[in-house]
Amino acid sequence: METSPGQAWIRVQAYGGPYSPKKFVYYADQEGTLTDASSWTRGYATMNYPIIRFADVLLMAAEAEIEAGTLENARTYVNMVRARAAKSEFWIKNEDGSDAANYVIEEYPAAQFASKESATEAVRFERKLELSGEGHRFFDLVRWGVAAEEINDYLDYEVQKLTQAYSGARFTAGKDEYRAIPQTQLDLQ
C-alpha cells in the first residue's frame, strides 16, 4: 500500500483512503500495452493470470496444515508473514518520517494455535489483513462456507448508515456465490 495524494486521488477521504492498493496498478505509459483498452475497467480487464504473493502461498499452506492437524507448522507459516509485516522499514511513513499508523504487529503465540478452531480463526484474520484490497476476501468467504453470514452481517451494519444504497440487500446462500454464465458465452458453445 502506498500513501495517496488525498482528495486529488480519492473521491471521499472518509471511506476511501488514505491508502491505495498497488497490485493491479500500471504506469500511464503502459496504457494499451498491458491493458485492454476496450472497456472502462481497462486495468482489471487484462489480468489474464492471478498474481500470487508469497504471503498468500504461506497462508494457503497454513490452512492446509490446520486441516492436516499440524497446528505448529501452520503457526510457523503465519508467523513468517507477520515477521515480514513487522519490519518497520516497510511501513508507510508520513512526510516527517513518523509512522503513518499505529503499527502493532507481533507473532502469534503457541496458545493461539492450541486448537483447530483458534488456529483457523487466526489464519482467516491474517488473510483478511494481509490480502486486503487484493480481491481475495469474497472468494475466501465462499470457500470457507461463511459468505452469507459475513456479508449479511456487513449489510446489516452498513444499511444503518447508507439506507438507500443497502436497503433490501441480502446475500442468499447457494445462489449468490456464483455468477451467471453470460449469454454470449453460452451462444458460442
Image (spheres, rainbow, N blue to C red):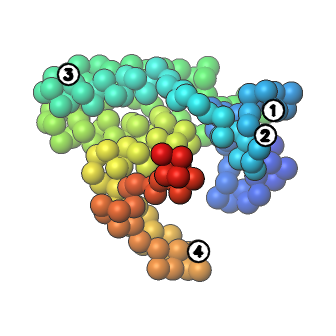
Label 3: element kind: helix
Mark 2 or 3: in front is 2
Circle on res. 54: none
Is the residue under label 3 in contact with that under label 2 (CB below 8 Å)?
A: no
Instruction: Answer with mark 1 or mark 2, whichever residue precedes in sequence.
Output: 1
Disc 3 marks which residue? 72
Could you tell me residue 22's position as x and y percent?
A: 66, 33
Which residue is at a point 40% across and 54% down the rendered structure image? 178
Label 2: element kind: loop
Could you tell me residue 81's position as x and y percent?
A: 42, 24
Could you tell me residue 116's position as x and y percent?
A: 16, 37
Quarter residue 55 falls in: top left
Circle on res. 32: 1
In this rendering, the answer to whether 22 lies above or below 57 is: below
The amino acid type found where label 1 is placed reads Gly
Mark 1 to mark 4: distance in Å? 34 Å
Instruction: Answer with mark 1 or mark 4, whichever residue precedes in sequence.
Output: 1
Disc 4 marks which residue? 165
Mark 3 to mark 4: distance in Å? 44 Å
Residue 98 appears in the picture as rendered: no
The amino acid type found where label 4 is placed reads Ala
Disc 2 marks which residue? 37
Which residue is at a point 53% across and 57% down the rendered structure image? 183
Q: Residues within 10 Å of mark 3 (few under 14, many from 20)?
A: some
The amino acid type found where label 2 is placed reads Ala
